[in-house]
């Protein structure tokens, strides 16, 4: 058989597999063009509800089955853990992959953490470095401010962390920050940044902002490592490209070698995260960063009714500088009910209106998880939450009902974090403050005074035998060290669930809760059982759980589906619900008086397009003692052609 014949057979085989991929998935003409593009750079402009996840996962399968790439050769980057989990599930099902750990699909931060852990010698961190959560960052920056004798009225921990985060998003080092010639109070911040970084390094810890920067440093200082990944990744896929920042774009470029294709999917109309460093200009100037890209518009909305889609599309159409997309309802979508706006006397009346409509929806057969209440700011949700709870309607506020934030869960995770890294002072402080130990606050404060990283564990070990403390306190410190030493002994052989069970039993935490007959104690025991039986069940090794802890949502599924969902508009991005309430549409509240006006228009568009079948907008004439006017966005909706066709109705309640 000649080489030419073999080549022809391979091409025919790939063509057949390409047809299989496409026949197994229902695609529109534009979706098919995006999936099968075989050039270098592809930008997919995916309007709300246009099937971008289907396009991404089908293109992934097409690259494997029709183009001959292995999953190992494809890097897919997302912005949320939920999006990554969904992609992994769809890809595994389409390709029959059982061991999904081999896939390179994840958030920017998760992928960077994986790269850094794979190169402990080159980075100097070691593979078991910790990733600081928000609480640990707060504690560390407080230590820094105290050590530098900074007046907390001048520089608060939050102010310092926000400045540090902004610098890291732009790739600005402490030295670079100092050279920016800041004045007054701002002059202190580069010093805080420098010492904060020093203490992170001493604790074998990185924060989220470090992960991308350290990978870029790794590549800059170790070219063979960079070349290894450039050879490995023959295709890079990026979801939600409108949310990228400078460092993320640098990372994409650093990971791509010659011949590596790029698929970027995004929608500038949904760019709502400038406040956390995202730069919409990267999707607007995509052609400047990546040579001669092919652009595909996904313009059919498969999520919302025609009324919702037409109203939202016309609302955002006049935003200056946006890419033209012309989103339209898919032919299969029903016209649906008009979007309604109701002007109510005050916040209690607004809450009563939402409660009444929620009851109607439930009576009509809606599931609780089908209903969402969205607001520009969380404080606007409080009266509604209180009224729903009073009416015995299960309610979940996304920002503070995360399973992993429950007190008893955080208490046990602290044992796992400290077992994995004895330098994790924040975890030891959490353990010391657990109520069942009954260690006086002034004793804990004394033990945590040291500015030395790892100093809290050393202080507990030292004071467990100190006669300067009361005998009961010394005994409790000794008990903490005994439990910790036992956990350290079994860290490599016991599962995380077994380690938590050991901590519960040996620390007396379980017994303390069992001796309490209150509903609170019973709920905590139930939460701990769910932690061990559900969240930790899939992990055989402690290090695997610690590695994934910052990147996985462990919230049990029923908490997301068996309650009415209350959340901010930003938290709702990427979600969809049959029934949506958009509350607090008043001048100055929304659009917010201090926010970018254009981004507020986009935020309103995102809110509208979360609704699949029904959208209710509400405004209040008064909140507390403050009299308000309806949002100018209401007038803007009234002026659309969609409103003229009856797709939007405004009334007084």
Image: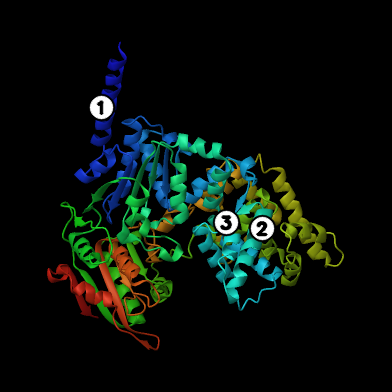
Left or right side of 306 for 85:
right
Figure disc tally: 3
Instruction: State the image coordinates of residue 73 (x, y, percent, origin top left).
Output: 43, 35
Give me the residue at 56% from left, 63% from top.
Answer: 164
Residue 86's place in the image compared with 475, above or below, is above
Left or right side of 473 for 184:
left
Q: Earlier in the sequence, mark 1 or mark 2?
A: 1
Observer-nearest residue: 7 or 419?
A: 7
Q: Which residue is mark 2?
A: 198
Q: Can you tell which quarter of the image residue 235 is in? A: top left
Q: Earlier in the sequence, mark 3 or mark 1?
A: 1
Residue furthest out toward the top: 1
Left or right side of 7 for 526:
right
Residue 16: numbered disc: 1
Q: Can you tell which quarter of the image residue 316 is in? A: bottom left
Q: Which residue is mark 3?
A: 207
Q: Residues within 10 Å of mark 1 (few under 14, many from 20)?
A: few
Q: Earlier in the sequence, mark 3 or mark 2?
A: 2
Residue 454: numbered disc: none
* Label 1 – label 2 distance at C-alpha: 56 Å
Q: Quadrant of the N terminus?
A: top left
Give me the residue at 13% from left, 71% from top.
Answer: 644
At mark 2, the secondary structure is: helix
Depth check, mark 1 against mark 2: the one in front is 2
Residue contact at pointers 3 and 2, CB within 8 angstroms? no
Q: Quadrant of the C terminus?
A: bottom left
* Label 3 – label 1 distance at C-alpha: 47 Å
* Residue 367 in sight from this viewpoint: no
Residue furthest out toward the right: 467
At mark 1, the secondary structure is: helix
């Amino acid at each position: 058989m000649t080489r030419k014949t073999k080549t022809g057979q391979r091409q025919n085989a790939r063509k057949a597999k390409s047809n299989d991929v496409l026949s197994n998935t229902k695609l529109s003409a534009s979706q098919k063009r995006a999936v099968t593009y075989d050039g270098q750079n592809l930008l997919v402009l995916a309007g709300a509800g246009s099937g971008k996840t289907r396009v991404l996962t089908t293109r992934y399968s097409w690259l494997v089955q029709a183009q001959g790439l292995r999953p190992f050769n494809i890097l897919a980057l997302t912005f949320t853990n939920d999006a990554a989990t969904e992609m992994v599930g769809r890809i595994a099902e389409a390709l029959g992959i059982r061991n999904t750990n081999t896939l390179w699909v994840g958030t920017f931060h998760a992928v960077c953490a994986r790269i850094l852990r794979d190169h402990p010698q080159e980075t100097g961190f070691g593979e078991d470095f910790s990733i600081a959560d928000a609480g640990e960052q707060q504690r560390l920056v407080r230590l820094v401010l105290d050590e530098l004798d900074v007046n907390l009225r001048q520089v608060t921990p939050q102010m310092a962390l926000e400045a540090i985060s902004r610098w890291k998003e732009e790739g600005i080092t402490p030295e670079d920050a100092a050279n920016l010639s800041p004045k007054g109070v701002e002059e202190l911040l580069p010093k805080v940044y420098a010492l904060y970084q020093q203490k992170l390094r001493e604790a074998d810890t990185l924060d989220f902002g470090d992960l991308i920067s350290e990978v870029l440093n790794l590549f800059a200082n170790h070219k063979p490592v960079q070349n290894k990944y450039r050879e490995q990744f023959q295709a890079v896929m990026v979801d939600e490209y409108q949310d990228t920042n400078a460092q993320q774009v640098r990372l994409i470029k650093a990971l791509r070698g010659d011949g590596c294709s790029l698929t970027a999917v995004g929608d500038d109309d949904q760019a709502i995260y400038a406040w956390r460093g995202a730069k919409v200009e990267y999707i607007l100037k995509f052609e400047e960063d990546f040579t001669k890209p092919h652009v595909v518009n996904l313009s059919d909305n498969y999520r919302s009714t025609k009324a919702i889609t037409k109203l939202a599309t016309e609302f955002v159409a006049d935003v200056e500088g946006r890419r033209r997309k012309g989103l339209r309802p898919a032919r299969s979508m029903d016209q649906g009910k008009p979007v309604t706006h109701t002007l109510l006397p005050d916040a209690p009346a607004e809450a009563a209106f939402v409660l009444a409509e929620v009851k109607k929806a439930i009576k009509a057969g809606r599931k609780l998880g089908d209903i969402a209440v969205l607001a520009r700011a969380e404080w606007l949700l409080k009266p509604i939450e209180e009224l729903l709870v009073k009416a015995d309607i299960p309610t979940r506020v996304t920002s503070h009902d995360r399973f992993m934030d429950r007190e008893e869960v955080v208490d046990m995770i602290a044992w796992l974090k400290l077992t994995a890294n004895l330098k994790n002072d924040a975890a030891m402080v959490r353990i010391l403050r657990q109520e069942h130990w009954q260690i006086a606050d002034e004793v804990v404060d004394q033990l945590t005074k040291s500015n030395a990283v790892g100093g809290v564990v050393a202080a507990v070990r030292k004071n467990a035998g100190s006669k300067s403390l009361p005998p009961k306190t010394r005994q409790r410190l000794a008990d903490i060290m005994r439990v910790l030493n036992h956990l350290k002994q079994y860290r490599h052989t016991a599962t995380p669930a077994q380690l938590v069970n050991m901590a519960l039993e040996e620390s007396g935490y379980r017994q303390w809760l069992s001796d309490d007959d209150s509903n609170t104690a019973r709920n905590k025991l139930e939460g701990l059982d769910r932690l061990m039986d559900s969240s930790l069940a899939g992990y055989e090794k402690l290090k695997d759980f610690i590695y994934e802890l910052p990147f996985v949502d462990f919230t049990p599924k029923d908490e997301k589906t068996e309650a009415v969902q209350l959340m901010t508009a930003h938290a709702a991005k990427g979600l969809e619900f049959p029934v949506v309430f958009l509350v607090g549409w008043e001048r100055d509240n929304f659009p917010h008086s201090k926010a970018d006006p254009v981004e507020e228009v986009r935020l309103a568009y995102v809110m509208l397009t979360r609704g699949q079948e029904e959208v209710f907008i509400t405004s209040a004439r008064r909140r507390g003692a403050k009299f308000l006017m309806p949002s100018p966005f209401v007038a803007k909706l009234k002026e659309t052609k969609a409103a003229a066709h009856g797709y939007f109705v405004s009334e007084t309640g």
